[in-house]
Amino acid sequence: MKRLVLFTPWFGPWPVWINLYLESCRRNSEVDWLIHTDQDLPENRPDNVHFIPISLTEFCDTISRAIGVPINAPNAYKLNDLKPMLGHAFASEISNYRSFGYADLDVIFGRIRHFYTDDLLDRYDAISGLAGHLSGHLAVFRNSPENRFAYQRGRHWREAASSFYHIGFDEGAFSRVYMSRSWIGQRLRRLKARFENLHPNVDSTVEPPEHHPQVWTWRDGILRSDRNDGQERLYLHFMNWRSDRYRNPSLGRAPWPALNRPLPLIDWRLGARDGFQVSPRGFEPLTADAVD
């Protein structure tokens, strides 16, 4: 069996950084991605990224038939509430993997298997990139019936699936299914560990911005930041640079929309060959000090 596969559905135009994102996937050859999408294939098409053509309606209908609840997603953002159900709805697509999970496209990955080792993946039912809750932008589970159906233990899961509105089920009620077991495990001195987070190795863009590394470098699949003494990082989630959706209004506009011009973007072929850096300025060539 293969080790790990990540669901990353996407509907609507690709983000401008898609080819750089895919290059960071390419360098994780022990991880596969399943991208269900209604878009034409992007230019960069790694062998470990599998594009599955499907419309948003067909995608939701597949989930609806599996869980027995009608789904009417007004837009692709509503799919965040459905992420915990993907392992059940698309079980046949992940049957050859020991672990599965879901991820977002507004990230750049470092070396996933450097952090998500066989020992870690075998030891825990769920692994999160954030402390305190399951991260919607990267969460990984042991591929077992218990985990594929775990969403059914989430409070009001049927309402979460059928609601016209996005309610944050993936990081809320579903997260508590695993976190409650973690807290019990701590009281029992972790006699049977159930949940693990890798918070020190990722960037939580919901933390105060003064805690955020401001310059991230990617080269040959290795991701580092200008904090933590240049240690390797698992991934960068740049949500609060690209969008105002969850940004505190007192901080002003998100940096990328505030540029009021097309986002600076290095050609993905050059980025693949020479590396690149990501910052509030966009995606740029590595600086001389970063190359050294």
Image (cartoon, rainbow, N blue to C red):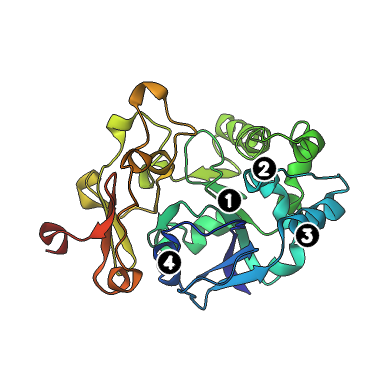
In this figure, which residue is indicated by the disc labeled 3?
A: 58
Residue 22 placement (x, y as % from top left):
45, 66
Front-most of 27 and 19? 19
Element under disc 3: helix
In this figure, which residue is indicated by the disc labeled 2?
A: 78
- Can you say which quadrant of the picture contains the C terminus? bottom left
Element under disc 4: helix
Front-most of 259 and 17? 259
Label 1 vs label 3: CA separation?
A: 33 Å
Q: Residue at x 63, y 33 (%)?
A: 172
First in sequence: mark 4 vs mark 1: 4
The amino acid sitting under disc 3 is Glu
Is the residue under label 2 in contact with that under label 4 (CB below 8 Å)?
Answer: no
Mark 4: few/some/many CA within 10 Å (<14, 14-19, 20+):
many
Q: Quadrant of residue 167?
A: top right
Element under disc 1: loop
Left or right: 289 as drawn, with respect to 155: left
First in sequence: mark 4 vs mark 2: 4
In this figure, which residue is indicated by the disc labeled 1?
A: 124
Is the residue under label 2 in contact with that under label 3 (CB below 8 Å)?
Answer: no
